[in-house]
Amino acid sequence: MQFHQAPVKHVSYVDINVTDLERSTAFYQQVVGFRVLSQDESTVALSADGEQAILTIHQLSSPKRETRRTAGLYHFAILLPTRADLADFIKHIAEQNVQIGASDHWVSESIYFADPDGNGIEVYADRDPSEWSWENGEVAMAVDPLDARDVLSHATEAGWQGLPTQTIMGHIHLHVADLDETKQFYTDALGLDIVCRFGGQALFIADGHYHHHIAINTWNGVGADKPSQTTPGLKSFTLKLNGEDDKQVVLNQLEAFGAPIEHEGNTTVTVDPSGNRVRLDV
């Protein structure tokens, strides 16, 4: 997990809005395998290890259904420690009456599905970085069919026991309104690198030579409206920085870029040009 710890900037935590907290809590426990770390009337913090939350779901007070395509969450991605864990998860989710998709991205193998509100979820396992193919600073990725038979051959006798304790938030993938403008925010202001370009409509962005910590796409349309905080979807995600010095560098870059900077208690929040909220943590 060297790509998700200091000194590498990485996505550590995601907040999403839901319409029915009780229903969503049951889904994330039973289907995904999270443990409830803490809860109150409007929020539930979810953990893989019982100690550190990586996802919080928030009850919308007056939920509305978005009828137009907007910027916002495409999916958040939960990274499992091993391919065997992915095999166990596939066997488990096949029994849950949940519609899924699957892909081999060359750098990783993934299962895709959505929660009851349509919030996109990816559960994946990385291939060994020695198998990734890099050229001129960019990594080769694809959307190939998953060889499920081969993956399932690695399933364990014990089977799925919920998310393994070493599970982390692997990355986040966002719908954006303008690819170039949003790219500049994540590279020039937040200091990340473009590591893959996909079809002229998607970019993969990372630190520390990972295949991606953040992806952005315009698949909901160039000029898509900003996401609403009254509908299901992304509330915010947290980018973990490399200490206070790194945070100050990022704040200076955000100011030079012209990005908004807000302070919520001890947390600093900014917003990308498409309206996606980014919390900065150290």
Image (cartoon, rainbow, N blue to C red):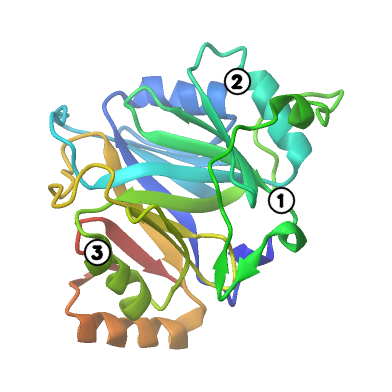
For label 2, the residue is: 93
Q: Disc 2 residue type?
A: Ile
> Distance between the Cα atoms at labels 1 and 3?
30 Å
Which is in the foreground here, disc 1 or disc 3? 1
Q: Which residue is drawn at 13% across and 34% down?
A: 68
Q: Residue at x 50, y 16 (%)?
A: 98
> Distance between the Cα atoms at labels 2 and 3?
34 Å
Q: Where is residue 247 in the image (x, y as percent from the top left)?
A: 40, 81
Residue 93 falls left or right of residue 54: right
For label 3, the residue is: 272
Q: Disc 1 residue type?
A: Arg
Is the residue under label 3 in contact with that under label 2 (CB below 8 Å)? Answer: no
The answer to whether residue 48 shows anywhere in this view is no
Q: Where is residue 135 in the image (x, y as percent from the top left)?
A: 60, 71
For label 1, the residue is: 127
Q: Disc 3 residue type?
A: Asp
- Circle 3: is it few (<14), some (14-19), or many (20+) Cα within 10 Å? some
